[in-house]
Image: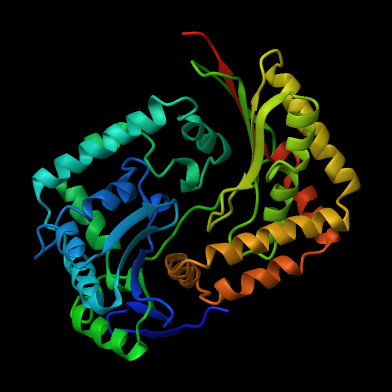
C-alpha cells in the first residue's frame, strides 16, 4: 500500500506527497498532461522535442544540469503518446533545489534560437538513427497508421515525418509551451524523506506565483471499430522476416484492461508462454516471438510480434500464430496457467514499486488519469480476474477482423 497526501494550489497545480523516512533521497516528479496524441497532424513530434528543449535553459537559469549536479542530483525525462514526464532525485536536504529548477522552467523556457537549433538537430539525428537506419526501426511508423485511421495514436512520439521538426519555428515552440506547460495541466509528485508540510510550503513558494494559464480541453476523435483485417507488406534490408499483428483493445481505465494484459501474457510473455513454447522451442519456426499491450490511456493495441527463422515464410508464421490463437479461443485457459501469469504480473508490480522513483511516477500516472489510488488497486484488479473473464476478453479482441498485420520482409542489400 502506497500512502500519500495531496493538495492543490490556487493556480491548479495538483501536488501529491509520499513520505518515506527509510531513504535519504527525495524525488521530484512533474508529469505534464500532454503527449503525441495532442499534436496536430501537420506538426507532429513536438511533445518529444519539448522533452529535449526543457533541458536547454529556462527563464532565469541558463543551465538546468549544472546546479542539480552540484547538489548531488540526477534527472531524466520520457515522452509517451499520452504524457511527458520529468523527474529528478536529490539528497533530501537539497529538496528545494529541485523546486527551484522545475518551477523556473514551468514559468518559461529561455526560448533561445540556438537551443532550438541544437535540440532540433538532436531529435532529427535520433529519428534517423533509431527509426530510419536501424533494422525494423520504422516498423511502428508503419504499424500505427495501419491500425489507427482516426485517433492521433496513428503517429509515433518521434513524429509522423521528420520534416515537421525540421520546419518547427520559434512561434510553434512558444505556442506549444504556453498551451500545455501550465500548472493546471501538470501533476507534481514529491516522494522520499520529506514531510507534507514542508512540501506544501515549498510548492506555494516556488510554484504558487505561476499563472494557471488557459485550461486545456482534450477533444480527440475516437477510433471507430475496425471492421476488417488490414495488411501491409514492407521490404527492407533486415536479418529476418518479421510479422506484427496488432489487435484493438480497451483503454487504460476500462475494467477489461488487466484482463487484456493477462491475455497477452498467456500468449507471449516469456519462455513459458504458449507462442514461445510452441513456435520457438518446439517447432522452431521463429527465432523470437512475444505478445504485449501498448498500455495506452485511450483504447490501445494488443500486439503479437515475431521474427521468423530462415526457411519459413511470413504465411507460415501467420498461420502458426493463428492456430495457437484459435486454440486459445476454443479451449480457454486452465487455472494453473492463469495463476502463473497473475503471479508474474503481481510480482512485476511489486518489484517496480521497490524503487522510490517508480512509486512517484506510478502515482502521477494514476493521478493524471483521475485515479491516484490506481497504484494501490492494481494487484486486486489482477487477482480478481476469472477464467471466464479472460476467455470473454480474448474472444472480443483476437478476431481477424480486428487485426492489422505488418509483414516486414527481409531483402538483400
Q: Residue furthest top?
A: 413
Q: Residue furthest bottom?
A: 197
Circle count: 0
In x, y percent, where is residue 263?
73, 51
The answer to whether residue 257 of the structure is visible from this angle is no
Residue depicted at x 68% and y 44%: 270
Tell which of 155 and 310 is nearer to you.
Answer: 310
Vertical arrangement, residue 400 with respect to residue 8, above or below: above
**How is colour applied across the structure in the image?**
rainbow
The answer to whether residue 328 of the structure is visible from this angle is yes
The image quadrant that residue 398 belongs to is top right
Is 20 on the left or on the right of 401, as rendered? Answer: left
Is 223 on the left or on the right of 93, as rendered? Answer: right
The image quadrant that residue 378 belongs to is bottom right
In x, y percent, where is residue 262?
71, 54
Tell which of 1 and 201 is nearer to you.
Answer: 1
Vertical arrangement, residue 221 with respect to residue 315, above or below: below
In x, y percent, where is residue 74?
28, 60
Q: Quadrant of the N terminus?
A: bottom right
Tell which of 220 and 280 is nearer to you.
Answer: 280
Tell which of 67 and 134 is nearer to you.
Answer: 67
Vertical arrangement, residue 308 with respect to residue 249, above or below: above
Residue depicted at x 19% and y 57%: 65
Is 368 on the left or on the right of 75, as rendered? Answer: right
Residue depicted at x 75% and y 37%: 275
Residue depicted at x 50% and y 17%: 236
Vertical arrangement, residue 194 with respect to residue 89, above or below: below
In x, y percent, where is residue 223?
56, 48
Amino acid at each position: 500500500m502506497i500512502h500519500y497526501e495531496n493538495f492543490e494550489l490556487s493556480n491548479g497545480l495538483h501536488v501529491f506527497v509520499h513520505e518515506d523516512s527509510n531513504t535519504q533521497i527525495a524525488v521530484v516528479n512533474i508529469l505534464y498532461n500532454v503527449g503525441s496524441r495532442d499534436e496536430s497532424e501537420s506538426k507532429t513530434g513536438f511533445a518529444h522535442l519539448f522533452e529535449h528543449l526543457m533541458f536547454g535553459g529556462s527563464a532565469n537559469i541558463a543551465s538546468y544540469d549544472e546546479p542539480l549536479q552540484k547538489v548531488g542530483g540526477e534527472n531524466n525525462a520520457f515522452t509517451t503518446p499520452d504524457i511527458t514526464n520529468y523527474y529528478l532525485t536529490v539528497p533530501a536536504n537539497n529538496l528545494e533545489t529541485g523546486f527551484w529548477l522545475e518551477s523556473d522552467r514551468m514559468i518559461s523556457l529561455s526560448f533561445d534560437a540556438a537551443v532550438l537549433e541544437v535540440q532540433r538537430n538532436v531529435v532529427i539525428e535520433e529519428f534517423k538513427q533509431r527509426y530510419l537506419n536501424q533494422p525494423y526501426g520504422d516498423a511502428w511508423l508503419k504499424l500505427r497508421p495501419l491500425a489507427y485511421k482516426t485517433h492521433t495514436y496513428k503517429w509515433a512520439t518521434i513524429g509522423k515525418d521528420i520534416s515537421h521538426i525540421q520546419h518547427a519555428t520559434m512561434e510553434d515552440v512558444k505556442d506549444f509551451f504556453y498551451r500545455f506547460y501550465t500548472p493546471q495541466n501538470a501533476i507534481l509528485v514529491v516522494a522520499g524523506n520529506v514531510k507534507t508540510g514542508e512540501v506544501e510550503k515549498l510548492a506555494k513558494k516556488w510554484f504558487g506565483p505561476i499563472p494557471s494559464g488557459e485550461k486545456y480541453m482534450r477533444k480527440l476523435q475516437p477510433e471507430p471499430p475496425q471492421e476488417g483485417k488490414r495488411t501491409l507488406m514492407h521490404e527492407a534490408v533486415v536479418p529476418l522476416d518479421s510479422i506484427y499483428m496488432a489487435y484493438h483493445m480497451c483503454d487504460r481505465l476500462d475494467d477489461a484492461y488487466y484482463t487484456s494484459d493477462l491475455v497477452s501474457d498467456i500468449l507471449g510473455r516469456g519462455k513459458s508462454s504458449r507462442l514461445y513454447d510452441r513456435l520457438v522451442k518446439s517447432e522452431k519456426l521463429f527465432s523470437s516471438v512475444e505478445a504485449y499491450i501498448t498500455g495506452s490511456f485511450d483504447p490501445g493495441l494488443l500486439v503479437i510480434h515475431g521474427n521468423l527463422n530462415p526457411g519459413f515464410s511470413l504465411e507460415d508464421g501467420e498461420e502458426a500464430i493463428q492456430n495457437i490463437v484459435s486454440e486459445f479461443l476454443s479451449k480457454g485457459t486452465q487455472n494453473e496457467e492463469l495463476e502463473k501469469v497473475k503471479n508474474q504480473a503481481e510480482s512485476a508490480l511489486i518489484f517496480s514499486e521497490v524503487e522510490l522513483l517508480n512509486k512517484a511516477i506510478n502515482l502521477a500516472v494514476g493521478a493524471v488519469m483521475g485515479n491516484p489510488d490506481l497504484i494501490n488497486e492494481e494487484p486486486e484488479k489482477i487477482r480478481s480476474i476469472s477464467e471466464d473473464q479472460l476467455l470473454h476478453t480474448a474472444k472480443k479482441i483476437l478476431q481477424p477482423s480486428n487485426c492489422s498485420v505488418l509483414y516486414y520482409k527481409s531483402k538483400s542489400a
